[in-house]
Amino acid sequence: MTEATQQQQQPAAPTNATEAAARLDTLKADSGWGEKFLSGDVATVKEFHDLHAMIDAGDNVEMALAGITPGGDIPDSGAKLMANTATMLREIGLSDGVVRQALAGEGVPQAEFDAVTIWKGQRMRDPEFTAKYLAGDPEAGRLMTTANVVIANGVKLAEAA
């Protein structure tokens, strides 16, 4: 095999924590790589540490959105909870933007917070909406969950000038 062919078969180096976690999962499934790692192969051990450093420096919210839970066989419980929450919120029908907002705890401008609070109050006083919501109507549940994400995360703090 020529050097050019070997280089073509090498996957692109990961550029973020999500890609690094996926690469590490692929490598851990490769028994040949595992043997080299356990035997102390310098390049393999370096790659392992480099990937872990990239994962540790990564954005937990983005990894949760990608369904990646760092930690291997004993995952970090916070990361696992985040990934499971992302999955649950998507199943309800929330967009990735709202899921990201929920996981990151991002507040919204005061005007948006006030509008959502008023909307929720109006819906909770609407017998038709509350009947649908309490009966498990998916659209009513999606709307109420979206409102609850906004209200739970509160108002975005003004940035210092």
Image (tube, rainbow, N blue to C red):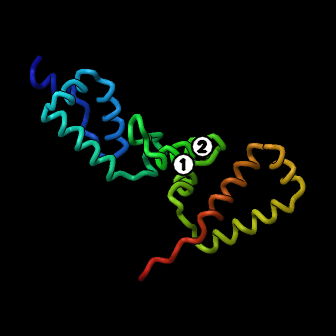
Disc tally is 2
Q: CA distance from mark 2 to mark 1?
A: 7 Å
The residue under the point 70% across, 69% down is 115
The spot of residue 73 in percent (x, y) is 41, 34
Q: Amino acid at mark 2?
A: Arg
Question: Which picture quadrant has residue 49?
Answer: top left
Q: Amino acid at mark 1?
A: Asp
| Rendered position, 137 above or below 24 | below
Sequence order check, earlier mark of 2 and 1: 2
Viewer-nearest residue: 77 or 16: 77
Residue at the image position 54 percent from the left and 48 percent from the top? 96
Task: Name the element at disc 1.
Answer: helix
Residue 40, by quadrant, is: top left
Q: Residue 88 has which mark?
A: none
What residue is shown at x 59% (from left), y 64% (from top)? 153
User: Residue lying furthest top in this view?
Assistant: 1
Drawn side of residue 128 relative to residue 84, left or right = right
Q: State the SS at label 2.
A: helix
Residue 108, above or below 93: below
Residue to which mark 1 is pinned: 96
Circle 1 residues within 10 Å: few <14, some 14–19, many ≥20: few
Q: Are marks 2 and 1 in contact (CB under 8 Å)?
A: yes
Q: Nearer the viewer, residue 31 or 111?
A: 31
**Is residue 20 rendered to the left or right of residue 161?**
left
* Residue at which label 2 appears: 90
The spot of residue 121 in percent (x, y) is 79, 65
Horizontal relation, residue 51 to residue 71: left or right: left
